[in-house]
Amino acid sequence: MARDKFKLRPKQKLVIALDDLDFTWLPSEIALVKTMWDFGYHIADIAAKVKRDQDEVAVLIMHLARKGKIAKRKTGVFGN
């Protein structure tokens, strides 16, 4: 069910999921992740190369896949 974005939030304390992670990316970082993805690198290797948490890389990969910027891989994030 879609939420009405103009509806008021409850008066309870809200929890921001994954607020300890950084989901901002420079274009050069995105290009490197895309290249490594295309070459079949494991997500752990990609994260190490860009010096980022694997979860941050996973979210970027999901973003790129949803936008059609990277192709699905038979082995997914585990590489070739």
Image (cartoon, rainbow, N blue to C red):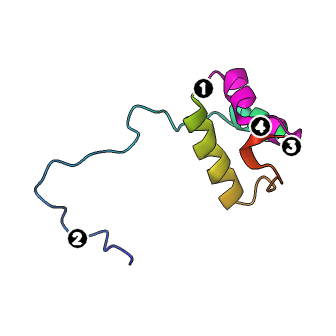
Label 3 sits on what residue type? Asp
Residue under numbered circle 4 = 31
**In the image, which residues are magenta?**
36-51
Q: Mark 4 touching mark 3, by CB under 8 A? A: no
Question: If you read the primary sequence from the N terminus, does the residue marked by circle 1 or circle 4 appear first?
Answer: 4
Please provide percent x and percent y for residue 33: 75, 36
Label 4 sits on what residue type? Ala
Question: If you read the primary sequence from the N terminus, does the residue marked by circle 4 or circle 3 appear first?
Answer: 4
Query: What's the CA distance linking mark 4 and mark 3?
Result: 11 Å
Determine the main secondary structure of the stretch shown in magenta.
helix
Question: If you read the primary sequence from the N terminus, does the residue marked by circle 1 or circle 3 appear first?
Answer: 3
Q: Which one is in front in this view, the residue at disc 2 or the one at disc 3?
A: 3
Q: Is residue 28 positioned above or below 34 on the image?
A: above
Residue under numbered circle 3 = 38
Label 2 sits on what residue type? Lys
Residue under numbered circle 2 = 7
Please provide percent x and percent y for residue 24: 54, 37
